[in-house]
Image (cartoon, rainbow, N blue to C red):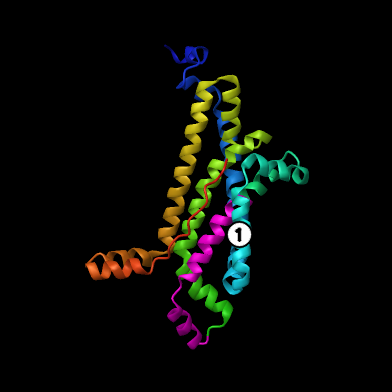
Amino acid sequence: MSEQNCLVANDWVCGEYLRTRGQELTDATVQHLGITVASVVIGVLISFPLALLARRRKAFAGPVLGLTTVFYSVPSLAMFSLLLPLFGLSASLVITGLVLYSLTILVRNILAGLQAVPEEAREAARGMGYGPLRLLWEVELPLALPAMLAGVRIATVSTVALTTVGAIVDYGGLGTLILDGLHSDFKAQVLTASVLCVLLAVLADLLLLGVQRWLTPWTRATAVRGGRGPHRRRAATAVEPEMPEMPEKVA
């Protein structure tokens, strides 16, 4: 069957759909990326001071982690409904909901990274005259960076998937195309938008993995040295922070 007829036949794979709806796919992809990037960036900016507060004031650790977990456990439809009176039907509604969902992942990983910094490193820095701010930026953050970036990767992939739920308010990026395709039984649109969403998640994870490896070259060197013998391998793995378990997200 020719490409011109695949639209009429409503095939799952249709080159004619890609040719005729290219601009529509591009616009949806750009919206999807914009919402994802804005949500993750704002989530990081909020999560970092929350993690510092939880680390510095032990009494706040439980409430902070508990509240972010509550946000994460709220179903997406309920979350958007609760935020609707504040933001109306807008991209801000979707971004705010996604930021709240990202907090538990980001706060937990930032906190885990900071707590895994060896106390000997802190003491050595204090002995060299480092104040609290310099200690944080020049010692603790570099050592906590692998765990922090791992959290950003998880939050980004999760946000790429959850952005599609924004289709219920017409701000779901590729999710809007998926929902419209399901309502109209437009198979090529459903498949194409779904594949693009998966590709976005994979590419985002690979990109952030590359950034993580570039910013933390010492982790590769440690892995190479640790692989030379069983004793070194055990020593290398012993210092890696244990990632906190995440509750299952309810769509």
As rendered, which of 134 and 69 lies closer to the eye? 69
Coordinates of residue 7 in the picture (x, y in percent): 51, 15
Kind of residue at disc 1 = Gly
What is the magenta range?
100-129
In the rendered image, residue 44, in percent from the top left (x then y), is placed at: 58, 58
Name the one closer to the observer, 208 or 169: 169
Vertical relation: 201 (above or below) 195: below
Quarter assignment of residue 87: top right
In this view, which residue lies farthest toward the left? 229
Query: Considering depth in this image, is 34 or 145 the residue closer to the camera?
Result: 145
Residue assigned mark 1:
66
Q: Position of residue 39 (x, y in %)?
A: 61, 50
In the rendered image, residue 109 lying in the magenta stretch gets the answer yes
Q: Give yes or no for residue 171 being in the magenta stretch.
A: no
Residue found 50% across the figure and 47% down from its top: 157
At mark 1, the secondary structure is: helix
